[in-house]
Amino acid sequence: MDKEKILKDSVRKLLGLNISDKEIIENMKNVGVTSDQAARILKETKDELSGKAAKPSVPKKGSSEEKESLDIYSKVYDNLDDGDLKAPLISKPIKNPQYNASGGSTDISKLWEKGIMATVDSKLGEMERIQKELDEVLDKKIKEKIAIETKKFETVINSHRELNNGKIDAHLDEKSNEIKKVIESRAKHMEDLNVKVQGQVAKIQGEKKFNAELLNNINDKVKGLDSVKSQMISDTNTAIIGAESKFNEFMEESIKKRDDMEARVNRTLQLESKITEGLLEDAKQKIDGLKLEKQEELTTRIQNELAEFEEMAAKVDPQSINERLVKMKELEGHLISRQKEIDSHIDERFIDYTKELNVFKKEIKKIDDSNLEELKKQYAANVDDLFAKNLIQWDKKLKSKEKEIDDLKEQIDLEKFNATMESLELFKQQFLNTVNKSIQDYNKSKRELAQSIIDRDKAINDYLKKIDSKMQDLNSFEKRFASEVAGLIDKIPEEKGSKKNSLKNQKSK
């Protein structure tokens, strides 16, 4: 179903209900139509309607109904005013000079009273009848108004439903057609591939026979190669066994030499450690001697200074004593600095001895590494000599076998065989890639369809929510309208009662 045709039909229905252009455009926006497209569809629909026939002038129902209801109210009140504003007839004596009212004045007043009462009763009956007619007219107008609004709302909902259904059906048809086309194209492609595969299979079967014959020849040659291989393996094993025995002898000699070298290194290290310990001990002794000398020198200097101080204490005043104390403190600071210098000198000498010891250890390690390199070179030279002796025989046998294989290659067209296998592998890869791509495209289309269905369900749920909100608005409008009509109806008896009371008051007067 054409989406634009459905939209135009819905717009015609809405225009027939005298719905404004703005509301029609908003309704079309709610179903996913852009504002420009909605305005264009509305204009085309109006042009079509104006081209077919002149649009009949539909009277505004709301204003005509209000006018009729106002006319009814005014008619009732006019009748009431006509009946109420007329002054009641009061019995007055008829001024007739020729008539004697002494005897019949009482009967005439009663007659007048009965006439007035009959007139009032008839007016009241007419007012009750008008009240009933007014109630019936109001009920009828209310029902008609509710029916019109209900029909209008149902028409809007139906148009929205038709638009959504048309849109969903068109989308589903479009997707189904796309999927159908894709499946048909894939099926046709698979048929073409099947034809190609059948041709390739027939070709492969023909080449399989050739390959079988070729494999038989190759198997025969392989058997000959196996015998040669076994012979070469036996010769190689014997050579390896001899080489292993020589290698074991060489390793035993190497181990002995290594042990001797380790013993020498250990002795050297022990000697170096003893030398280092001796040097350290000498350094400590020298340091202790220097400490003792410096301490003795300092003690003698301090004693001399104290003696001088005692001598000067007897001669010099307290101020000079304080000056000497300051000098003594300076001397003490000088002594502390000298002590620190001595300690730092001792630490430097100890660090130097440690560095020399590390250098000596590195030299010993280099000597050990050079000895190991020499042992490895000797072992490699012995092994190379062993293999060089046997490689000449192996080379001769391999050359003879290579010659036989070359002769076999000349008999067999290996290039054709390899090209056939490569083309078969390439075709298989292309076929698998095509099948995988088709499966991926199908899965992608399926996912897109599922996503479109999910989006459609979301749109439908959103539209149902909008419909629920519209229904709530309609219910609130009905309640508000009912309350307003009830208020109007309640006002009529009150006004009627007030009119009756005014009539009674006038009558009593």
Image (cartoon, helix red, strand yellow):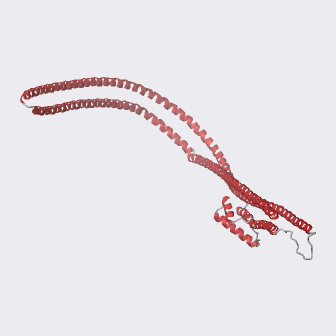
Residue at (50% x, 40% y) in the render: 402
Q: Quadrant of the N terminus?
A: bottom right
In this image, 160 relative to 86: left or right?
left
Q: Quadrant of the C terminus?
A: bottom right
Q: Nearer the viewer, residue 67 or 159?
A: 67
Q: Nearer the viewer, residue 51 or 191?
A: 51
Q: Residue furthest bottom?
A: 97
Q: Is residue 407 visible from the viewing direction of this image?
A: yes
In this image, 167 relative to 263: left or right?
right
| Snapshot quadrant of residue 281 | top left
| Snapshot quadrant of residue 16 | bottom right
Q: Residue furthest right?
A: 103
Q: Nearer the viewer, residue 437 or 12?
A: 12
Q: Position of residue 200 (x, y in %)?
A: 65, 49
Q: Position of residue 187 (x, y in %)?
A: 69, 52
Residue at (33% x, 25% y) in the render: 258
In this image, 435 relative to 162: left or right?
left
In this image, 291 relative to 231: left or right?
left
Q: Position of residue 421 (x, y in %)?
A: 59, 46
Q: Nearer the viewer, residue 378 or 483?
A: 483
Q: Residue furthest left?
A: 315
Q: Position of residue 275 (x, y in %)?
A: 23, 24
